Image: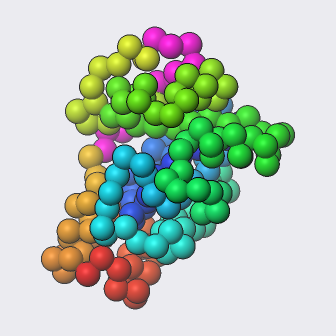
Amino acid sequence: MNIGLFFGSFNPIHIGHLIVANVMAETTDLDQVWFVVSPQNPFKKNKQLLHEEDRYKLVSLAIQNNSKFKVSDVEFTMPRPSYTIDTLLKLQEKFPQHTFRLIIGGDNLGQFPNWKEHEQILSEFGLYVYPRPNAEPSDLVDHPNVRLVESPLLDISATFIRAQIKAERTIRYMVPEEVEAYIRWKKFYV
């Protein structure tokens, strides 16, 4: 199968993530999209980061009714911070029958040359890029292994969602109902 890997902290997962993943699964040659829950992003330090098992559970709840989606905890047992190239190579070794592609936002494309082993990622895996607000232009848009995928431009952020929860406001329609119910039940982000 052709698998798109959508990495993120998913803190929490929201409809923006799900819409992008669905567009990737429905409009490209990807057979599935795997949500790779990252324990710690080397570029982000977040004091409000839920434990990875809790974020894994939220993603599981969000995608449970879509057979084209899977959630992966592959990075949970890897050294931290985890780097995308290491995860890609581990998945390639573990699932040699699949072809893996990396899904990133257009806002990450300009910074992509700063990623560890970015040239290897480009040559061996390739990028599927979705649009993001305020994305800087990048020379990589013309790279043969970079595919720009048209997708709704959504500016929904997990930061905004966490602030809404902390302020005791609704997050209805921003996350799936099951995700909101679990967040409220567990009293996450309060």
Quarter of the figure with residue 108: top left
Q: Residue furthest right?
A: 97
Q: Quadrant of the N terminus?
A: top right
Instruction: Name the residue: 51% across, 34% down.
Output: 116
Name above or below for residue 101 compared with residue 68: above
Name above or below for residue 173 compared with residue 153: below
Instruction: Name the residue: 39% across, 60% down.
Output: 14
Name above or below for residue 179 compared with residue 132: below
- Residue range (magenta): 142-154
Instruction: Name the residue: 36% across, 38% down.
Output: 152
Picture coordinates of residue 141 (x, y %)? 43, 17
Q: Quadrant of the C terminus?
A: bottom left
Can residue 130 be seen here? The reply is no
Q: Which secondary structure dominates the residues rendered in magenta?
A: loop
Picture coordinates of residue 129 (x, y %)? 46, 31
Comparing 66 with 11, the one in front is 11
Name above or below for residue 128 compared with residue 93: above
Comparing 129 with 20, the one in front is 129
Residue 109 sits inside the magenta stretch: no
- Color encoding of the figure: rainbow
Q: Residue furthest left?
A: 167
Can residue 76 be seen here? The reply is yes
| Side of 98 where 127 appears, left or right | left
Number of marks in the rendered image: 0
Picture coordinates of residue 156 (x, y %)? 28, 52
Comparing 184 with 97, the one in front is 97
| Side of 179 where 60 appears, left or right | right
Instruction: Name the residue: 37% across, 46% down.
Output: 43
Residue 146 sits inside the magenta stretch: yes
Picture coordinates of residue 67 (x, y %)? 67, 56
